[in-house]
Amino acid sequence: MSTSTGGGDDDESPDLVCQIDCVQGMVDALSSVRWKRHQDAVLELSEHGIVLIVEESGCLQAKVYLKRELFISYDYGSEGRPRFGLSLGLLVDCLNIFSANGNTSVIEISYPGPDMQLILKSVGLPDACLYAEIRTRIPDTISWEYHFEQAANTPLTFTIKSAILKEAIDDLEWPGVSIQIIMQKDPPSVILKAEGHGDLQIEFPFYANSDLLIAFQCDHNISYRYKYKFLKATTSNFPANVLRENRGSKVTIGRGGMLKIQHLVSVAKPVPHHQFTDAAPSRIAYIEFFVKPEEEEIVINDS
């Protein structure tokens, strides 16, 4: 990271040059999938936007979708979909420096640089230009590319307030190392159950006017167990705006018990408190987690 009067030019046109005016929103989205200090990631570029992929032990995978609409400009020139690896922690730390002390300047992101690096630089600062180069590498093969499939004709899914989901998972840390997720058709409800050193169960009944479960869809009883550490990673790094806005997180159980958890993170330039504007379409980053179950489906009685 350096401070200079400008960045160098390269004779060849890069695959991607884009600009974003809310660095903190991008930090929030990327931090949502940073569950350990030293963590590698794969970035995939396309005409539709940027996707960041991280995974753990072949059992947990997370994706951050930064669609091109989130950027104030997005110039994509590659014919394919370039992929490269980098340190997620280093990327987040660099972006944090660009947004330090309330800095709201636009940053430009380009790839590749002369040595295949990812280049970040501030745009529009009157006195200086913040400039960073992040070394990239040939990405490791993603150990599993899972095409999520529904478990049945009717999706097995529920939507729950994000803050409530995080609180429930945090509360289940004490009893043991695995969490059983049960969806019941009648009465319609979701049960999170932990067994180990103790026994703890949290139940969310579904009612039309419920403030807990926003939506619920289930045509038969189903139950799977998941490692606690992987389930916790899906909510442990929620940015403050997710808990504050509390939009709702969607949880779906797919074929073979594959668990998909989707969050929405606001990526919007902060508006001063004294400034009032008409409501504009939300600029949202989509976060997806995929968690593999510990074992085969646990059979429970439908009656």
Image (cartoon, rainbow, N blue to C red):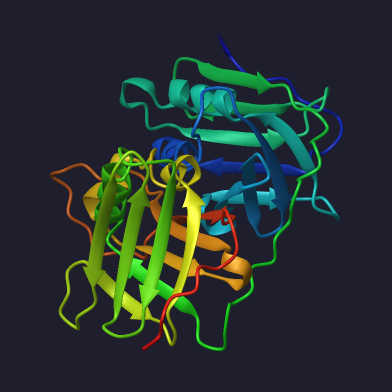
270 shown above or below 190? above
Left or right, residue 161 beside residue 251: left
Q: What residue is rendered at 50% in x and 81% in y?
A: 155
Residue 101 location in percent, x, y? 32, 20
Q: Is residue 26 visible?
A: yes
Left or right, residue 163 beside residue 103: left
Q: What residue is rendered at 64% in x and 74% in y?
A: 149
Residue 199 location in percent, x, y? 28, 49
Quadrant in the picture for the N terminus: top right
Quadrant in the picture for the C terminus: bottom left
Q: Nearer the viewer, residue 275 or 195?
A: 195
Left or right, residue 252 beside residue 61: left
Residue 173 location in percent, x, y? 33, 40
Q: Is residue 4 visible?
A: no
Q: Nearer the viewer, residue 166 or 222?
A: 222
Q: What residue is rendered at 34% in x and 78% in y?
A: 216
Q: What residue is rendered at 25% in x and 47% in y?
A: 167
Q: Nearer the viewer, residue 78 or 126?
A: 78
Left or right, residue 35 beside residue 282: right
Q: Nearer the viewer, residue 115 or 197?
A: 197
